[in-house]
């Protein structure tokens, strides 16, 4: 039995035949950008997040960047103002900050849950701090009460990167309604994925939503009148129709991910494999199921030799990337250990019980020195 890490073909097929007929309907309409499909999805997704405004954009990186650009325009922030970001995030969170002309300030994660360590955030605040940007990494929500308290106390904005956490809950509140602005990605592999690129900004702030929309449209609100040096970043009609079709199944899909995660938690009993820390079963949507092992590379090779595909999220931390060579000398020991030890096991709403059982069996049979 060969088990792929994420069988996107199977996910897509599970939405047929409805998916193809939706795509065909949009093709036939002759209207591909800035139309009813995007408006309809924006309304549905804002509602799903229990929030007011949603602006569809081209991808998750743009969603993050556009919020920062919009706040810069709205509040006159200067080049060099700072954004506190987790050091162990996917690099897009950090690229958004530099792309908006702001400075990322790296915060070490909590060793247990790999989420931004809220107890360190306060010590990173300077007079130039403008935003705290938690990332709900792996699909688990950060400690938003503490981060909100700090943001309020220091008068800074709170934006969360929700690219891995569509549908997650924190104390009964949906991700997308927990911060001043939330950024989503609909990259095909995300919990809510398009058939290509897509992203969205969700907020309760009407002026922010409007500024993001203007910036994403060449900085223009009124045709041929350009208020800002904007960009072109659109969610297209085809992707919006696909997302509208998939959204009603998101909660059920996340439940299926949780059921698989529960089995992994109960049945993986290997002494050298550390299972993830789950704060709340409703708060986690298991975008990925990440275990840790000091024999990570050996474990990955063993699983692969036995037909189980895995991935590492992520092999090199942002501060060790060539793109950020100015940080290469930094020592971030928790981030470093996480990147050396993490391994993501297959998880998806379309995995069968037999496949889950096989992953558990192979993981439990791993012996160091086997390969
Ligand atoms: C996927 C991802 C992004 C970027 O989304 P794209 O749509 O690929 O630009 C940003 N942040 C995190 C944490 C992600 O996982």
Image (cartoon, rainbow, N blue to C red):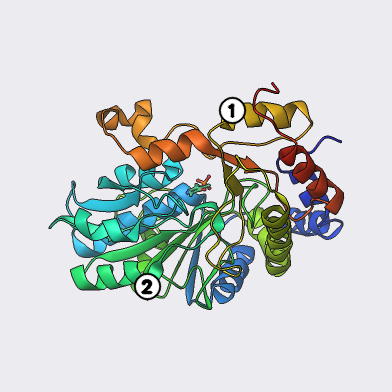
Residue topped by disc 2: 145
Q: Considering the numbered disc 1 on the image, is that residue within a helix, a strand or a loop?
A: helix
Can residue 306 be seen in this snapshot?
Answer: yes
Residue 98 located left or right of residue 4: left
Q: Which residue does the image show at 59% across and 28% down from the upper left?
A: 297
Check the picture and name the quadrant holding the N terminus: top right
Q: Which residue is mark 1?
A: 297
Q: Is residue 4 visible?
A: no
CA–CA distance in space, label 1 to label 2: 36 Å
Q: Determine whether, in the image, residue 330 is placed left or right of residue 269.
A: left
304 shown above or below 260: above
Q: Looking at this view, is 49 or 133 the one in front?
A: 133
In-front residue for pair 34/315: 315
Q: Position of residue 101 (x, y in %)?
A: 26, 45
Mark 2 beta carbon near ligand 1 (under 8 Å): no
Position of 48 relative to 108 (above/below): below
């Amino acid at each position: 039995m060969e088990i792929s890490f994420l069988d996107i073909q199977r996910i897509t097929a599970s939405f047929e035949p409805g998916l193809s007929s939706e795509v065909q309907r949009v093709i036939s309409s002759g209207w591909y950008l800035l139309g009813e499909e995007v408006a309809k999805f924006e309304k549905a997704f804002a509602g799903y997040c229990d929030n007011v405004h949603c602006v569809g954009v081209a991808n998750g990186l743009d969603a993050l960047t556009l919020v920062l650009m919009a706040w810069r325009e709205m509040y006159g922030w200067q080049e060099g103002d700072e954004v506190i970001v987790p050091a162990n995030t996917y690099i897009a969170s950090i690229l958004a900050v530099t792309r908006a002309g702001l400075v990322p300030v790296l915060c070490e994660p909590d060793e247990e849950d790999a989420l931004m360590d809220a107890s360190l955030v306060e010590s990173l605040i300077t007079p130039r701090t403008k935003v705290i940007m938690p990332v709900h990494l792996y699909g688990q929500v950060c400690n938003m009460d503490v981060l909100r308290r700090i943001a309020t106390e220091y008068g800074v904005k709170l934006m969360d990167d929700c690219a891995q956490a569509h549908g997650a809950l924190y104390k009964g509140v949906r991700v997308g309604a927990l911060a001043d602005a939330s950024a989503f990605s609909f990259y095909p592999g995300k919990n809510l994925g398009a058939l290509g690129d897509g992203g969205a900004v969700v907020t309760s702030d009407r002026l922010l939503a409007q500024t993001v929309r203007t910036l994403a449209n060449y900085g223009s609100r009124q045709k041929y009148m350009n208020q800002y040096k904007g960009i072109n970043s659109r969610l297209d009609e085809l992707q919006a129709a696909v997302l509208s079709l998939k959204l009603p199944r998101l909660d059920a899909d996340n439940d299926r991910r949780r059921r698989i995660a529960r089995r992994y938690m109960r049945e993986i009993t290997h002494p050298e494999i550390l299972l993830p820390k789950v704060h709340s079963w409703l708060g986690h949507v298991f975008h990925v199921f990440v275990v840790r092992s000091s024999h990570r590379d050996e474990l990955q090779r063993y699983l692969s030799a036995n037909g189980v595909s895995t991935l590492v999220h992520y092999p090199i931390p942002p501060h060790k990337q060539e793109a950020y060579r100015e940080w290469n000398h930094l020592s971030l020991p928790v981030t470093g250990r996480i990147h050396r030890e993490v391994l993501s096991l297959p998880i998806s709403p379309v995995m069968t019980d037999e496949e889950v059982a096989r992953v558990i069996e192979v993981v439990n049979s791993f012996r160091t020195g086997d390969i």
